[in-house]
Image: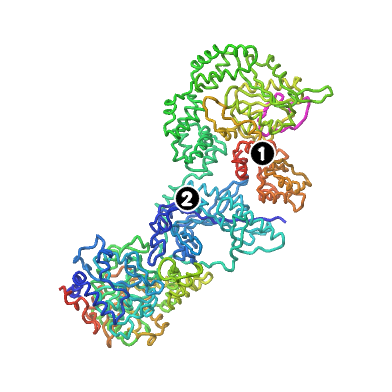
Amino acid sequence: MSYRSYVGLEIHIQLATRTKVFCGCRAAFGDEPNTNICPVCTGYPGALPALNEEAIRKSYVVARALNCLLSPLCEFERKNYFYPDLPKNYQISQFASPLGRDGFLDLEFRKRRKRVRIRECHLEEDAGKMIHAGDQSLLDFNRAGTPLLEIVTEPDLEIGEEAEHLLQEFRRIVRHLGVCDGNMEEGSLRCDANVSVNVDGAGLGTKVEIKNMNSFRFVRKALDYEIDRQQDILERGGTIVQETRLWNENRDVSESMRVKESSNDYRYFPEPDLPPFRTDDAFLASVEASLVELPAERTARFVSQYGLQAAQAQFLCEERGIADFFEAAVAAGAQPSDAAVWLMGDVQKLLNRTGATLTESPLTPERLAKLLVLLGSGRIHGKLAKQTLEAVFTDDKDPDHIIAERGWEQITDPGAIGKIVDAVLAEQHEAVAQIRGGDDRPHGYLVGQVMRATSGRADPRLVQQVLGERLSLQFIQVLSFGGAISGTRRDDGVVVPGSLESLTRSLRDDPALPAGIRYDELDLGGFLSEEVTPRDWALLIRAIARHVAVGDTSGIVIATGTDTLSYTAALLSWLFGASLPIVLTASATTGDTAESRDNLRHAVQAAMNRTPGVTVVFGSRRYPAVNLKFERVTGESAETAFRTWNPGGVPEPGVGLWTNLQGATGSREPSQPGADLPDVEMLTERLEGAARRIFVAKVFPGMPAGALIALIDAGIRYFVLELYDTGTASVRETPFSLRHALEYAHQHDVTFFCTSQQEADVDFSTYVTSHDLWRGGAIPMGKLTTESVYARLLAILLTGAAGDGSDPKAVARMMESG
Amino acid sequence: MSASKTTGWHHLLETSADDYAEALRARDAAINGFLEIDTDRRRTPGGVSPPDDAPPDGAGPLAGLPLAVKDNIAVRAFQLSCASRILANHVAPYDATVVARLVAAGMVPVGKTNLDEFGMGSATEHSIAGPTNNPWDTDRVAGGSSGGSAAAVASGMVPLALGTDTGGSVRQPAAFCGIYGLKPTYGTLSRYGLVAYASSLEVAGLLSRELGMVRAAYEAASGVDSMDQTSVGLPDAQARPAAAVQRVAFLGGELGLDERTAQAYRRMREVAVGAGLTVEEVELATADAMMPAYYTIAAAEASANLARFNGVRYGERPIFAENPEALVRHARTEGFGAEVKLRVLLGTYVLRSGFQEQYYQRAQRVRTAIRRELASVFANHDLLILPVYPTVAFRHGETDLTAFQQKLADRFTTLANLTALPALSVPAGVYDGLPVGIQAMGPAFSEERLMRFAELVAAELPPERPPAYGVPLCDEIGSGGGA
């Protein structure tokens, strides 16, 4: 039997008005009890309410933003019930004619677009607070009479996560509109829900109201709990009791508060003390004037207008202040993508460290723009740009002022650098001789000497270039990372791991490659591709990260094996994005073959062209690093061994998640780039920790759910699940389907990231079984392959891009933003 | 009325406040019109002095005049008991707007007057302080619910008193006591500071023996108040109904009046004809539906308005309660009188979900019908003249009228409350020792027209003083004589 759940929300927001809704008292949170009170808001005999126009205008602004029909006549009613914290023992509210009705909010959740209908918006007054202390009950009326806007949705939501998503989108909207700070913990945003479950196709079931959900997370958990509870009852042939239940956040269960029979009759009738409020043209014009571009529209515009990635646009548009800051910085001359990267990365880190908010920090959009222009024009390099940013925070001065004051301006004059390089080369006879003799090892040392001579102010790329010119060399780092390409074939025909030495030697003599390329070779271990461990990856990542930080190479070539090439390539791409040209290659045969030499040569050529980003070269073809599939094992036709799946779904290389880890070790010495890199042990530990929590599984007929449950019990928290088609799998009531595993996973906060066994776009939109998966909390990964998804998960957990990885929701958000 | 008769009040408080207080208490002993008397509280430094914009003593028609205020209207530093146990000892922290405006015009509150608990009654007998007696015959009631105010004025204790009129509570006691009682157009006197009974029906009202004083006080106290969004400003003089009276309609049909009232009503008609007015008779088709509609609406609003009295923030409450709910229950059970409980329960009943169509909404439709009918009356007539009450002041208890008959007898006064229109109770002579008041009603904002009509009546039937209280206190206090 297939079930369907229906969830509707009742959202209350405290409108951010200077005064209360019916009197002149300050509407403020956190003041001494009973200091913001007067005869009106404490219901003294004879006191009358007087409507605050700011509250009514803000209410209409929200209703308008939610696409509601606006009532031309706003009438109030009395809702009668006795409660000690309600001064008049009736609440002035709206019932028969709410100020807004029949609106909607468009949502996109897990690749599913939905229009959630808004039934109504109405304005009312808040109650005071009752605190029980020992044998006393205390009352604080500061909150009594603060304006409260209630938004009621139709039961168009289906699961807890979706409701949480709506609530967060709603929070963004009201914050953008400046009508509420949306703080659930402090109660300025509150949410009750009604939930019903019924057999699919049979319409709404018996409604249960859920209260006391005091955070976004509790909303999700309470609703999922309630849906499961009702479905269990129905499956056992029981009936649902219409009731109100309270979420108990300590026990993770809901508890019955009252059943329908004893519910209140509120005896609504028109409020005789307030004449109906009529919306005239001037008022409606002021409502329109208060409307701002909403976060969803703005996010879309940021992508189309500024060419930002969806995740960047989302981050910026989370807060109106940040989005405004970004646009102001762009207007002041910053490159949009740079501004986005800096705001998300270094600026955010500094804000976290100082505890300031962007709008009240010393950083202004003009200062950020100036900094980025200085960086873009090469007047300072990246490391100093970061330090300049910190100095802006500490000194509250303009970046150019700081740079001039501290003598940080970068040396970008090739002539000046040339002089310094010449001076260094003149001193370092030995190293020069060594390099001219074909040993490239002292190269990094020479770069370091030049940097030291300029106190770190020389543009490292220019140093590289000038040094290369002086020595007539271009530096390409070749990393040997296992695989047959560096292996040899034993006499018995079996391939065994080896080293790359002979190959790179052959490169030096390769007439097809320009003279003057110098290969710095680093052997990261002799193993076959299929033997790769997290520790191997840690070594590789550390080596690349060092080059990225130091800037002593113009490109990196990685020779590895075919079996795990798709994983390694995707992992490096997610981590390093478009920082350096990084080219992976492999060969189907051992290193002594022509194939190996050809592939390596092609890879070097690709690395020389200076286009940053991770790519794969195999045979004569070049592939993006993400969505690479190892499809065929062929000796002769290398062209068909690999193929890119869903080429349209491959994301452009971005900043790379690695930036999340930068500075994690705390060293801030400017003259030694790369000094603050995490060490291999830490990387290994993190990768192993991540790997212990991830499992890749593929659905197949007869898949035993019990096995997945056992994996969850064994500590697996994230599954990359290969489904059929656009995301289908069996969820029939049988032990040989995903059903029980999904339920178990949901209870244990385990997440399924879903890919396809075919070259498909997983979006759960086509089949009924997909809908069950969607309801079960599985996350569709769209056009990404299993390898790419697994690699992304590893990269996120490694870099802490979603915190320490213990919050599956944060991880899921990062996964979806890829 | 000649001005000389009122000048005695102007400097009384300035010269003889203590004597006055003493005389007030003495005279009130037989009347029981006051719940609290203090001639000094708003004059001494410890009390609250008049606002800066008050005219200097002696300036303006109201300057220095003592003011009695019904005890359901807030006067800062005075009690605000509503004659209810639940508000016993409650002191108002602020002034009602009407009080503040009269104080600004120079008046001095000297006491709070007796009433039916929360204004619910027609005889000032439902009071924790006991009944107020009629100055014309202390065996009889002073009317209600503003009985204390009416008796205080009629017995010459104060020149002017404030009352509230929800269904006739100013006009009926004024009629019983032989003075003027104005129930103005809804909204022209702010309700801020009036303890609400039935918000959409009630207004503050003015009681005095002197028409000029009613006029001056109405001018001083009326106008828009930001604290009461149902308040309205008076339209410009040109936009207001003309003050001149030409055509008057007398309510006809079977009115059920007692002999003295019928006699006064006839006399009033003779006066009108004698003054050269065109007199016609009208009947109201909505008359029978009026009382059920009135009590439905009044009780419904009362059930919510009185919900705030729960013993939590002010007023009387039990010393101990198991929990907040029990505290509220006990406070209300012990704090409210029987008549209040009756109306709150009735209001709760008519507002139940599922029954609103049958009661509350039906009552509102009746109200609309009555408004329309009155509008058509005033399309053809300047005024509608009708009795205030079917009888003269009745004897205490239910000797003459049962509680139910008393409610039905409100049928002439509730008309003005249901329609929000102004009405003035005009003294129409004394018959066999008891005064009778007849009511003049007009279209919205026609207060001046009502007073012109009253002047016309006064020329023939000037208000009289009760035999036992022929001399007002200001004249009785030797040193207080100003003129």
Badge 2: few (under 14), some or many (20 or more) residues near its Cα, within 10 Å?
Answer: many
| Residue A663 in view of the camera | yes
Q: Is residue A152 above or below residue B359?
A: above
User: Where residue A556 sits: x, y (%)?
Assistant: 64, 24
Compared across the picture, whether A497 is left or right of B138 comes to: right
Do residues under tags 1 and 2 come within 8 Å of each other at their CB atoms?
A: no
Q: Earlier in the sequence, mark 1 or mark 2?
A: 2
Residue at image point 54% right, 25% down: A672
Number of numbered discs visible in the structure rendering: 2
Which range of residues does the magenta coloring cover?
Answer: A616-639
User: Where residue B228 sits: x, y (%)?
Assistant: 36, 63
Residue B475 belongs to the span the image colors magenta: no
Residue A623 belongs to the span the image colors magenta: yes
Which residue is the extreme one toward the left?
B483
Q: Secondary structure at mark 2?
A: loop
Quarter-wise, where is residue B103 in the image?
Answer: bottom left
Image quadrant holding the N terminus of chain A, namely bottom right
Which residue is under mark 1? A690
Badge 1: few (under 14), some or many (20 or more) residues near its Cα, within 10 Å?
Answer: many
Image quadrant holding the C terminus of chain A, namely top right
Give the residue type at disc 2: Cys
Query: Disc 1 is attached to a residue of which chain?
Result: A
Give the residue type at disc 1: Ala
Q: Secondary structure at mark 1?
A: helix
